[in-house]
Image: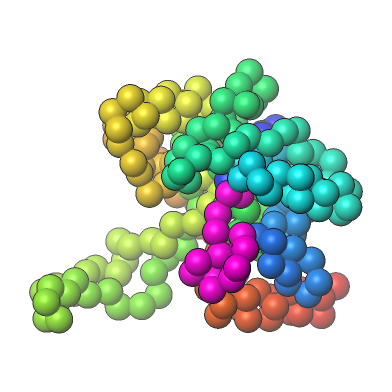
Amino acid sequence: MKYTVVLPAAGSGKRMKADRNKLLLELSGKPIFIYTLEVFDRDPDCEGMWLAVKEDERELIEAYVERYRIKKVKGYATGGAERQDSVRAGLEMAAGQCEVVLVHDAARPFISPTVIRELVEQANESGAAIAGVPVKDTIKKVRESVITETVNRAELWMIQTPQAFRYELLMEAAHRAKVDGFLGTDEAMLVERMGHPVQIVESTYDNVKMTTPDDLIYGKAILASRLQEE
């Protein structure tokens, strides 16, 4: 099943304690976001990628895409003040070019092609599907440093990207959110508020988002492990 992917790439380096967009930081000599793009570039079912970038980083990102010979980047939207704005800008550029669209954090370079395939198939069938993994740890609600409840771990999932949708469904959800002034934490939340069910596809714990310096250490370990397996 063919799909298009929108990748918000207009982030900062604040939590990474970096002086630039964290996506431009390197893992084993290559920018983080290039690893992410390569996954989709190799996937024969991916028909194209749309990146939402900062205007002042566009030329630099384009240069990296050319340098690493990424073929499926179709265009660059200008990132907005919020991630939700950046995604909507990318969706608007992809209008009329896909039935199923994925939204994926450019800072998650270790997504599994198998998970991508399952997400696309599920989104095609039900309209909306997102990646996630079951919570491992015991979770407790706390108020003013006092535990108020131990939450049933069996019902909790840590949500990741990609998140996959029928294009028209996600575009409508994004439009409604803009009109209502609603800011969600992910694309699934925008679809959920319309009353549309969202399926979950079990992902892998390796699909970590490069957010803090500790994540870079974990990312390097994942890369080293994969090189040993080849």
x then y, percent, for residue 53: 63, 44
Q: Is residue 151 left or right of residue 86?
A: left
Q: Which residue sits at x=85%, y=73%?
A: 230
Depth order, front residue of 69/64 = 64
Question: Image height check: is 62 above or below 93?
Answer: below
Q: Is residue 80 left or right of residue 207?
A: left
Quadrant of the frame with the N terminus: top right
The stretch of residues the image draws in magenta is 9-22
Question: Image height check: is 219 above or below 195?
Answer: below
Provide the major secondary structure of the magenta segment. loop
Scheme by which the image is coloured: rainbow
Q: Let me know if residue 125 is in the magenta part.
A: no
Depth order, front residue of 119/38 = 38
Question: Image height check: is 226 above or below 129?
Answer: below
Q: Is residue 76 visible?
A: yes
Q: Is residue 42 visible?
A: no
